[in-house]
Amino acid sequence: MNNQSINPTRLLGRLAELGAIGRDPGGRLTRLAASDTEKAGRDRFAYWIEAAGLDIAIDRIGNVFGIWNPEGVADAAPLMLGSHIDTVIDAGIYDGCYGVLAGLEVIEALKEAGFSPSRPITVAAFTNEEGVRYAPDMMGSLVYSGGLDVDAALATVGTDGTVLGDELRRIGYAGNHEPGFLRPHAYIELHIEQGPVLEREGIALGAVENLQGISWQRVTIEGDANHAGTTPISMRRDAGHAAARVITFLRDRARASNTPTVATVGCMEFQPNAINVIPSRATFTVDLRDPDETRLKDEEAALAAFLETIAKEEDVAISVERLARFEPVQFDAGIVGAIETAARARDLTCRRMTSGAGHDAQMIARIAPSAMIFVPSKDGISHNPKEFTADGDLVDGANILLDVVRKLAGEG
Amino acid sequence: MNNQSINPTRLLGRLAELGAIGRDPGGRLTRLAASDTEKAGRDRFAYWIEAAGLDIAIDRIGNVFGIWNPEGVADAAPLMLGSHIDTVIDAGIYDGCYGVLAGLEVIEALKEAGFSPSRPITVAAFTNEEGVRYAPDMMGSLVYSGGLDVDAALATVGTDGTVLGDELRRIGYAGNHEPGFLRPHAYIELHIEQGPVLEREGIALGAVENLQGISWQRVTIEGDANHAGTTPISMRRDAGHAAARVITFLRDRARASNTPTVATVGCMEFQPNAINVIPSRATFTVDLRDPDETRLKDEEAALAAFLETIAKEEDVAISVERLARFEPVQFDAGIVGAIETAARARDLTCRRMTSGAGHDAQMIARIAPSAMIFVPSKDGISHNPKEFTADGDLVDGANILLDVVRKLAGEG
């Protein structure tokens, strides 16, 4: 089977072309879910689906599917490949897009090679995986797998005050199919690692066997706006200082432990945000992740306890809103094994690993056997213009995906 | 002289009327310098100046003057009263407005009583005292006293991207007089304390003999945007965490010292400000104040040293921009004594004190003998809708201002 390969020029060319869509005048790449720039990316993907002779389908949450449905196998459950094409703010070109375009490439390569699959093969681009504009992240695949009601998801109000359902209609990607209309036989997601492990260990491929649990919370601290010059330190109810104590608490705790737990405060806002006024309100997000559910619960409890402590010590009122919560996910051992087998057959080094990031695969795992393939990320950098994976690694990953697809949708 | 008094109804009525100008639909009072809402306040003040039969004059930085220039005294240097009518965001009604309207009230009362002054008496409303929209604060009086070039000040770009000179022209308050065109014989500013001392000690009046030095800086910390789930804590260059360490450092240092030093971080911004991305940039302001110049310099040096430390420890790049710097100010002993004398004559308790806030008086003190009169602030709250001073205290303060004006502009 190793004499067949994907078309490297086509895959790498499309990756560069999609990566050029959604750049601002300063060259920053930003395709937030259901925005004008993401519409341009969706339009390009839809064009490639049709150019490949695949059927296109869009569901109510805006997930886009390219379906290869050869004669006689229509009744079999489809093998599904995919990821997402929305991005964070000032993003790199690989996160998500690589999995979508490699999925499309694998289907085209198999079609051109006259491969006759035992079931339909589908490539999916799921809506709002990043969750920057609308929470929670991985929304499209969460809805698709039945984890979130589609109407509730469509009513989500974004950080910019927009409603997701309105935006999907506006950009022309509010489809008619019910999410979940195709129940996959299996799901495979190819992705850059977004971490330093493979590069640091000099390993070509990761067979991802599980995925960290994720906890997202928004914390609001209320104090008193007061004059910066005349209010003695002892009389202050400083929401900004209380928020700073939470950030240093989370970092000190993570540094002191030897667990893989990570905690991040990514969003912060002060009110009234004036130089000479003590902040009356600080609003910030906390992102906690751990591959072990018990430890993740411990971290959430430690944060809650510390918030109670500073509420007393700083004389502030604190409220917490849960934005998202996903337990750690176990992937399908059979597919993970197939990935390792394919790597060996191509003489590529491979290791089993945990995904530190959330991915659509963790959602689809609710309804179908799923797994992921990782390729190395330079310096582990992601969600950043410096995100980079070497062409050779990208091609190797896509060929392994091809081999695993051949096995799971092989001539029956 | 104590048989004469200001008109309480007129003063309190105007304070309420001006306090109703510039409220948003939610009732929040905001009159940022040279904004549409501040124009409405300026128009109202100009109307009252003309209704009182005073001459009105506007200088190039937009300072507004109401001038009582009786026959025969035009050659004498004018006695100047005043403060400002711009506000912070979501402000109270007393800060600044009380000093301006009490100054106008004192002139009207003296005029009505047939008082014949030995020199012109002027009430001034200085531009952009709060410094929320344009830095530095106290800009109008700073320019008036020659501490800042008027053209440089007019070119100031605001937090909203506007240029002060354009905005003054737009609202019709770009005057023709050169700042400083009236060189005061003396300057007296009546103001709420904006601190807790008078109320806590049950004292009616403060004779302000000096004023804290003020240091404003903007700090920018640059790290690396990176994935919140896959980047080990040890590999992070987290600008947000570094900023939080600065806030807790300043607070811990202030709490540990027994000096009146105060430090405030009022503004904070994270970039890219996304839940699942480590902040690549944090920008925040530091407001340091101390009545002793040596101690203020020590605090600035301690902050600079700590920034160097965390730049190394957190592997981030830090840049600092000075926004404003004013040394502590000594007021005129003669005027301070006259305030104490007037208080005794009306059987009102009075204490000498330091101003913790910056005021226009500190700028005018560069060109004329100056001092301030404080009245109590409930709970020391200011720059906040809860800012409150009892009517009786407001009237007492205005009557003491009247008495001191009679003394400094007495029948020659």
Image (cartoon, coloured by chain):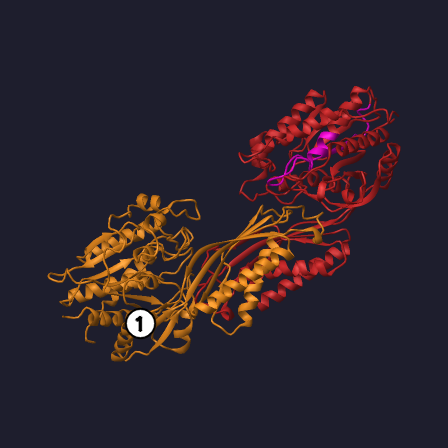
Chain colours: A orange, B red
How many numbered discs, if any?
A: 1
Which SS does the magenta portion mostly show? loop
Give the percent coordinates (x, y) of residue A182: 23, 57
Give the percent coordinates (x, y) of residue B379: 71, 44
Question: Considering only vertical position in the picture, is A180 above or below B101?
Answer: below
Residue shown at the point (64%, 33%) measured from the top left: B62
Question: Considering only vertical position in the picture, is A53 above or below B28?
Answer: below
Q: Nearer the viewer, residue B197 or A299?
A: A299
Magenta span covers which residues?
B73-102
**A291 sits to left or right of B60:** left
Q: Is residue B370 magenta?
A: no
Give the percent coordinates (x, y) of residue B359: 72, 41
**B137 sits to left or right of A8:** right
Q: Dividing the picture into quarters, in which one does residue B97 lie?
A: top right
**A346 sits to left or right of B379:** left
- Please rate how many residues cluster around mark 1, counting C-alpha atoms within 10 Å: few if below 14, some from 14 to 19, many from 20: few
Q: Nearer the viewer, residue B295 or A252?
A: A252
Q: Is residue B84 magenta?
A: yes
Q: Quadrant of the N terminus of chain B?
A: top right
Residue ID for mark 1: A392
Give the percent coordinates (x, y) of residue B107: 77, 25
Q: Dividing the picture into quarters, in which one does residue B69 lie?
A: top right
Q: Quadrant of the C terminus of chain B?
A: top right
SS assignment at label 1: helix
Residue shown at the point (11%, 62%) measured from the top left: A72
Residue shown at the point (66%, 29%) measured from the top left: B16
Q: Amino acid at mark 1?
A: Gly
- Is residue B146 at least partly visible in the picture? no
